[in-house]
Image: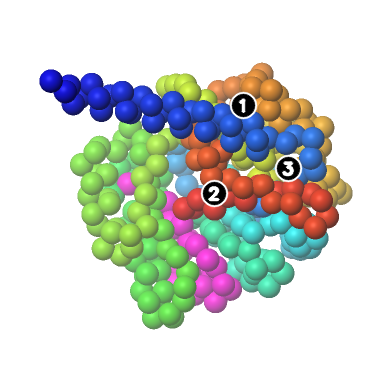
Amino acid sequence: MVHIPLIKGLLKNVHNLRQTLLLQKNISKRMRPDDVIAPTHLAIETTNICPAKCVFCPSQFLTRPRGVMDMDLFKRIIDDAKNCSSINFITHGGLGEPLVDTLLAERVNHEKSMLGAQIQIHTNGALLSSATTQKLFDAGLDVLSISLNAFHSRTHRQVTGLDYDQVRKNTEQAFKIKEKSGVQTDIRITMVQTKNITQAEVKDFIAYWRKFTSKVAVHPQKNWGGWHKNNVTDPKFPCKWIWHMMSVNWDGSVTLCHEDYDAKHVIGNLKNSTILEIFNCQDLQEIRTLFAKGQFPSRDQCHECSRLRLDKAFWLESKIKKLPSGIISYTYRPNR
């Protein structure tokens, strides 16, 4: 007699083994720490000022100075990005609320005209007025990601410290402006699920906002390199960020990655160095070499980072592209 559950279990184990072997092969093949690497993704924090007090975010506890990026510095960075010939994706978020930056639409327009890259903004929606929304759409913004983080006013106030009624009004108005304008900007709605949010509220959140868009996502709470102590479990995968993304703070300083929220490990500054120089500096090369050897860095932020549990798809799907200059870049286009 055929034991169906047993056969299914064996087939699943075989599939998992094949996936594991493929993953190991891909990681080994893709890790090339000795090559000069160009990033494809710039995460530019144009400000680290934020009106929200989100319980899952360390922004309110920063010790580094607060400010807004100087426009001359910003243009220097974009000019440098054009010289790299590799940047195809730029995000604005970081540890601040991007809409605090009154020049944001002008910056987006400059990025689109200079690079033609996909531009994405992450906002809590509190400052998303009709006028600001229209300016961003007119500037050519590709993705407007609105982090609502709750569905009910009471829990939204607990989680973010913001007025949910105003945020919801701003968000719904953005959809109306998009429809009226006929722009192609993709509006996405997200939530970070914290202990404040019940499963019933998650269901209500998804059901309500899917009336406006199919792009509704609920994300697990990350630990910001160990700042938030949550239970993270193996398996860990090599970090993907250090191979394809550069994190730039409002003052031009560059950190190992965006999990270094308080800029404890600055590896350079784009005021006086280039993107390629910093992305191939000794600190980053040493960490890449460790990962290539199957080792994990001893730095607490790396060792405790919950994102190392989320990087499997990058190693299965990313491709290495060789630029005319001989420099390589890692292309990866997930559903951002």
At which x and y percent is residue 265? 72, 32
Q: Residue at x 26, y 63 (%)?
A: 211
- Camera-nearest label, 1 or 3: 1
In the foreground, 79 or 102? 79
* Mark 3 → mark 2, Cα distance in angstroms: 20 Å
Q: Look at the image and say whether residue 134 sits in the magenta stretch.
A: yes
Looking at the rendered image, the quarter that the N terminus falls into is: top left
Assign a secondary structure to mark 3: strand
Residue 274 in view in this figure: yes
Residue 77 is a magenta residue? no
Label 1 and label 3: CA atoms lie apart by 16 Å
Residue hosting label 1: 302
Residue 254, label in figure: 3
Which disc is residue 50 wearing?
2
Q: Nearer the viewer, mark 3 or mark 2?
A: 3
Residue 280: percent from left, percent from top:
79, 40
Q: Is label 1 or label 2 in front?
A: 1
Amino acid type, callout 2: Cys
User: Is residue 322 depicted above or below 8 in this figure?
Assistant: below
Secondary structure beneath dot 2 equals loop
Please tell me whether residue 138 is drawn above or below residue 30 in the rendered image: below
Scheme by which the image is coloured: rainbow
If you read the primary sequence from the N terminus, does the residue marked by circle 3 or circle 2 appear first? Answer: 2
The residue type indicated by label 3 comes to Val
State the residue at coordinates (75%, 44%). Answer: 37
